Amino acid sequence: MTDPALPSVGAPPGTPTAVEIFDTTLRDGAQFEGISLSVEDKLRVAEQLDWLGVAWIEGGYPMANPKDEEFFRRAVNELQLSTATLVAFGSTRRKAGKVDDDPTLRALVEAGTSTVCIVGKSWDFHVTDALETTLDEGVAMVGDSVKFLRNAGLRVFFDAEHFFDGYKANPEFALRVLEAAATEGADCVVLCDTNGGSLPHEVQRITGEVVSYLEGVKVGIHTQNDSGCAVANSIAAVLGGASHVQGTVNGYGERTGNANLMTVIPDLTLKLGIETLPEGRISRLTSVSRHVAELVNLPPHAADPYVGSSAFAHKGGLHTSALGRAGGASYEHVDPAVVGNRTRVLVSELGGRAGLGMKAEEFGLELDGAQTKDLSERVNLLESQGWVFEAADASLELLMRDVQGWTQEFFAVESYRVTTEHLNPAGGNDAALSTEATVTVAVDGERVVTEGSGNGPVNALDAALRSALADRLPALSKIHLTDFRVRVLDAADAAGNADTGAVVRVLIDTTNGDETWTTVGVSPNVIEASWTALVDALVFGLLHT
Ligand SMILES: [Zn+2]
């Protein structure tokens, strides 16, 4: 049976046929809590964005931040961008100041990019109350700055800050600001939902009104996710006529984030038939999402649309048997391969042997009837003891290989030991806390004893194991643990007996930059559970890297 065709989709008449993608991960995204990027990190993120094929990469704010200044210096000299153009960000001239001696504008010219993006105020209240100047001066600040930058030979984008709130309060002033930017030669005027409080119906209507008012001027959209509508608002703006969309990888951004380009791009491309990336690039989306998550050192979001590891994951009998019979289209809104992702079958007691068979196929393994029966019994037994294979594909694959008689030959563990010492526990001084691990392993026929230290037992064990194996197994340098989760199961036993019944489940997420995988360990002892998950994480990585 072949897949039923996906419903045919397309944009309503009047929608732009192409939208340029403007990425601001390195500027707005870098404001996300928990992100702190070195210049080196920023260069690597920029390479990923270029590989994906976005049109514009906003690199940062050279005036506000010396690190951004260095980024532009190195980016202009070192990066070989093939599809993207680098953009420096700044603001308009100061009030009552002159453009030629304005430090922000000078920093923009000195950043050395061909293109700059400046932000200016379009909400009357912010001009009169925050800037404490007249509305006429507010308009002049925008017009003068665009003109100055254009005269310096630069392409200029204008971000209209608080545009939607400003338009609702005083549409005449908000439009005057845009008009000043457009008249002085801005390439695109970008409507910003700076506080992120707008809803899609407003964004679509207001964008439509701006597009018809400014006939012939390119209009862009920049949304924040404070109402949970950043992606929806971006789509709404495009339906209203916007042809330039700003956003970030994985939706990183101030507060609740920006429009997630990993969702916006496939929504526009696959659902509305709008051109966004160069031909053939959209299949790189999942890889870029995960690679950038690794570069910014945040765990990828499993439930993210299109690119998350759960985006095409199916659990339970009905789903999985329908998938087996009819293929993906029966329960998937798009073919996951189109965005570089894949269908996953989640194995649990519900899944049964049919699920395990499909899972084996997914891993490229062939199990015969006896092996499937053996595997099914072992999975059921282990799950009754607290293991969860639906969340730990990598451990399941290793278990399947084990059932087939495979054993890993990368290394053999003889013993490990880990100690934590606190020299000043009462003082609460973490600097006095140290964890050290020793492992003894056989690798390449040689017995090696190594030590490692870390901020906790898993780190220390990981470090010790790596120093034992690094020389012989260089692929390990690409493999990093990204997340670690512990759960205590069955802790509430009979009174006074709580710890005898408790087991601990540890899940470890690991990546090699292209793929991420999860392993599981269960034991009454948290270190042993961690060790099991850690060893499987590295073995799986070595097998697949
Ligand atoms: Zn923003």
Image (cartoon, rainbow, N blue to C red):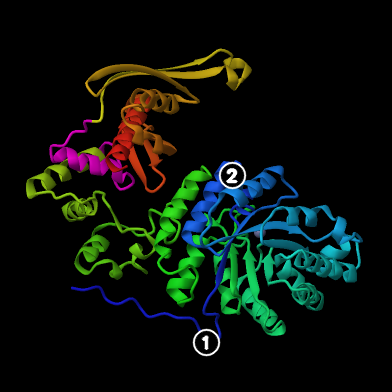
Residue 6 shows up from this direction: yes
Image spot of residue 418 (x, y percent): 40, 18
Checking the image for residue 35, the label placed there is 2
The amino acid beneath tag 1 is Pro
Range drawn in magenta: 384-409
Please tell me which residue is depicted at 37% across the width and 25% down the height of the picture. Answer: 527
Whole-angstrom CA distance, mark 1 to mark 2, is 41 Å
Q: Callout 1: 10 Å neighbours few (<14), some, many (20+)?
A: few
Q: Name the residue under label 1.
A: 13
Q: In this view, does 316 lie to the left or right of 476?
A: left
Q: Mark 1 falls on what kind of element?
A: loop
Q: In what quadrant of the picture does the C terminus appear?
A: top left
Q: Residue 388 lies in what quarter of the image? A: top left
Q: Is 124 placed left or right of 509 in the picture?
A: right
Q: Is 45 situated above or below 199? A: above
* Above-or-below relation of 344 to 510: below
